[in-house]
């Protein structure tokens, strides 16, 4: 039987409708909406498209949006000053440092000037530590979106064997922590793993985030597995594919995320949720 499509677009649309109501209530209570500030260093066309999309989504749910666009050759000190200024600005509730940064800039140094309570990307070292400890934190958006998608479709995690293919900072590591928080048994596969297919064949759920087009094929999967694909790979003809060969996996899996339209839309809506969460927390602390 063909797999169920885990439709991230449809789920994200439902979540945005709920967010719009919650943002409206926030504005009624405090007299202003949650505000997201995006700090972007110029020079990356893909970042321009992403930031325009985030602006559109913020405005659609009633959030305020501001863009701080820095020149491509901006100095590290200037970037850090901008983050420190926004962190101290009470009217700004969430800050997103748009990645990637140019090679001459250090992300890790910059993050030390960002208030972790406004880190709506969930990448600050303090938020990473809180995540591992199982404490409340602003979570990284891609893995948080993946978990939300699984829960929407009532796919259980407790006690399930889950393969996490990829050990990157954006998805693999935080996703592993979130899966463990849900009491899953997680088997992590990375570049030094000897026999990845052997691991996948004993797993109920397979999560993939490696940045290699169609690396995982259907024959590697356990029949009936659930597949969550975080890959975004643009082909020479302009089409987009994931890290999983969708056609072959679709025949064996019980459920699978499409690319595009799976984890991507969920990532964006989780960012908006983090902005609202940060705004609420800051109001409670005033």
Image: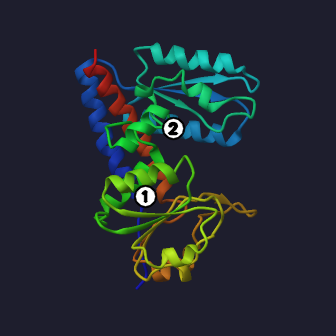
Percent from the top left, x then y, of residue 265? 47, 51
What's the mark number on residue 267? none
Question: Image check: 114 left or right of 186?
Answer: right
Residue annotated with mark 2: 54
Q: Which residue is identified by label 1?
A: 8
Q: Residue at x 43, y 20 (%)?
A: 92
Q: Residue at x 71, y 38 (%)?
A: 44
Query: Which SS class for mark 1?
Result: helix
Q: Secondary structure at mark 2?
A: helix
Please tell me which of labels 1 and 2 falls first in the chain.
1
- Callout 2 crowding tier (Cα within 10 Å): few <14, some 14–19, many ≥20: some
Q: Position of residue 140 (x, y in %)?
A: 45, 43
In the image, what residue occupies the spot 37% across and 26% down? Answer: 34
Asked if residue 219 is positioned above or below residue 36 in the image, the reply reads: below
> Viewed as shown, does residue 121 lie left or right of 150?
right
**Would residue 99 be found to the left or right of residue 188 on screen?**
right
At label 1, counting other C-alpha atoms closer than 10 Å, the crowd grade (few under 14, some 14-19, many 20 or more) is: many
């Amino acid at each position: 039987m063909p797999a169920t499509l885990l439709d991230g677009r449809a789920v994200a649309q439902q979540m945005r409708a709920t967010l719009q109501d919650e943002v409206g209530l926030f504005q009624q209570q405090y007299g202003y909406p949650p505000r997201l500030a995006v700090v972007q260093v110029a020079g990356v066309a893909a970042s321009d498209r992403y930031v325009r999309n985030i602006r559109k989504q913020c405005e659609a749910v009633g959030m305020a949006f501001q863009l701080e666009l820095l020149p491509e050759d901006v100095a590290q000190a200037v970037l850090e000053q901008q983050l420190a200024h926004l962190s101290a600005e009470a009217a700004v509730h969430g800050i997103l440092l748009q990645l990637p940064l140019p090679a001459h800039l250090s992300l890790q140094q910059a993050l030390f000037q960002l208030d972790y309570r406004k880190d709506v990307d969930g990448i600050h070292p303090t938020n990473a530590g809180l995540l591992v400890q199982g404490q409340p934190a602003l979570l990284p958006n891609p893995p948080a979106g993946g978990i939300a998608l699984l829960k929407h479709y009532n796919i259980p995690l407790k006690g399930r064997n889950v393969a996490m293919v990829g050990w990157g900072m954006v998805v693999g590591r935080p996703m592993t922590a979130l899966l463990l928080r849900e009491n899953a048994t997680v088997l992590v596969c990375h570049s030094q793993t000897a026999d990845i297919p052997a691991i996948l064949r004993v797993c109920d759920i397979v999560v993939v985030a490696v940045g290699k087009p169609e690396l995982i094929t259907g024959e590697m999967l356990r029949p009936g597995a659930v597949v969550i694909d975080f890959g975004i790979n643009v082909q020479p003809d302009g089409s987009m594919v994931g890290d999983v060969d969708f056609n072959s996996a679709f025949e064996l899996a019980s459920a699978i995320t499409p690319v595009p339209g799976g984890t991507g839309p969920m990532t964006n809506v989780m960012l908006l949720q983090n902005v609202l969460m940060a705004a609420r927390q800051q109001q409670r602390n005033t």
